Amino acid sequence: MNPPTLTRRQAILAAAASSLPLGGWAQSAWPDKPIKLIVPFPPGGPTDTASRITAQALGDRLKQSVVVENRAGASGSIGQLAFKGMPPDGHALNMLGSPAMLAPHLYKSAAYHPANDFAPVAMVYDLPIIIVVNPTVHPKITDWQSLLAEARAQGGKLNYTTSGPGSVGHLTMEMLKKQVGFEMQHVAYKGSAPAMNDLLGGQVGVMFSDLIAALAHLKTGRLRAIALGAPRRIDGLPEIRTIADQGVPGFSAEPFGALLAPKGTPAPIVERLNAEMKAILAEPDVQDRLIKAGCYPRYMTVADTAARIRTDFDRFGKVVRDNRITAD
């Protein structure tokens, strides 16, 4: 009697398992304990909220608890450094937000490379950013071209603010200044909330903000939308035009959230997690909950996730170096 033959899938999995040291991963065993999801930001923000939505859905699909652990500080770099040392056994994950991706350019203590020191799993969401103005302060600024005209008319004296030095909003405006050819002065705040408060109070008239932070004030008319950094208009807000729509073709700048695993995590685990995230992000309930948190679902393959992290890290890093921006 001939021995049973393995299917191609069984052979691949057997080879993967046999290449691991004793106690390594096997398809039938993983996950065999709760999975820890490291969020390098405080509770309550968009990344934390998106992570908790993701953790619940992923836990349901894997039939195992996925527990969110917040490790905030230094633009997310404290959490990333803690995650960097975790074992690559499929029981530790991380939600990389753009501030943590940028931190190595801004903090000497952030000793990691977001594209090289972790295993990308999947892109999870985009976090749109938007230029807004206080219409009482700047009644004549109604779109990107009028903002540009006002900046040029003031000869570099027009102020704008963001959530802080080295934020995606700050780096995006600096990128635009060089690409388009104009000057504005950055007024630095430590966090989005104080910057938004002073924008609403008229102490500063222009802000590059997360869309979610500005949305309620756009609806009441206290702020006016000028342009999105995203490469596309947003479902549900079709009236808000992008920078690319308004004379800067191809321009795109958008923070993201990406699911990572420790470097060295077995490829079958990474691929399984990617497949689960693809299914999760297609669920209407998950999409609705993410959008309410200001996070727009954006699934990507492992390879495309890795490419986006590297591209954004490199291009924003050049802006940091060219403008000698630091957060230390």
Image (cartoon, grey):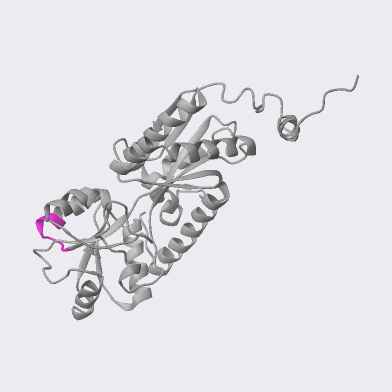
Looking at the rendering, the stretch of residues picked out in magenta corresponds to 199-205
Q: Quadrant of residue 135?
A: bottom left
Which residue extends farthest front?
A: 1
Q: Is residue 156 above or below residue 67?
A: below
Which residue extends farthest right?
A: 1
> Residue 220's spot in the image, x, y percent?
12, 52
Can you see residue 158? yes
Q: Quadrant of residue 11?
A: top right
Q: Is 201 contained in the magenta span?
A: yes
Q: Residue at x 36, y 74 (%)?
A: 178
> Residue 151's spot in the image, x, y percent?
22, 75
Q: Quadrant of the C terminus?
A: bottom left
Q: Residue at x 46, y 42 (%)?
A: 80
> Residue 147's spot in the image, x, y percent?
22, 72
Can you see residue 191? no
Q: Is 294 contained in the magenta span?
A: no
Q: Is residue 135 above or below residue 8?
A: below
> Residue 179's spot in the image, x, y percent?
38, 74
Q: Is residue 311 above or below residue 89?
A: below
The residue lying toward the viewer, choosing from 60 and 120, is: 60
Q: Quadrant of the N terminus?
A: top right
The residue lying toward the viewer, choosing from 103 and 210, is: 210
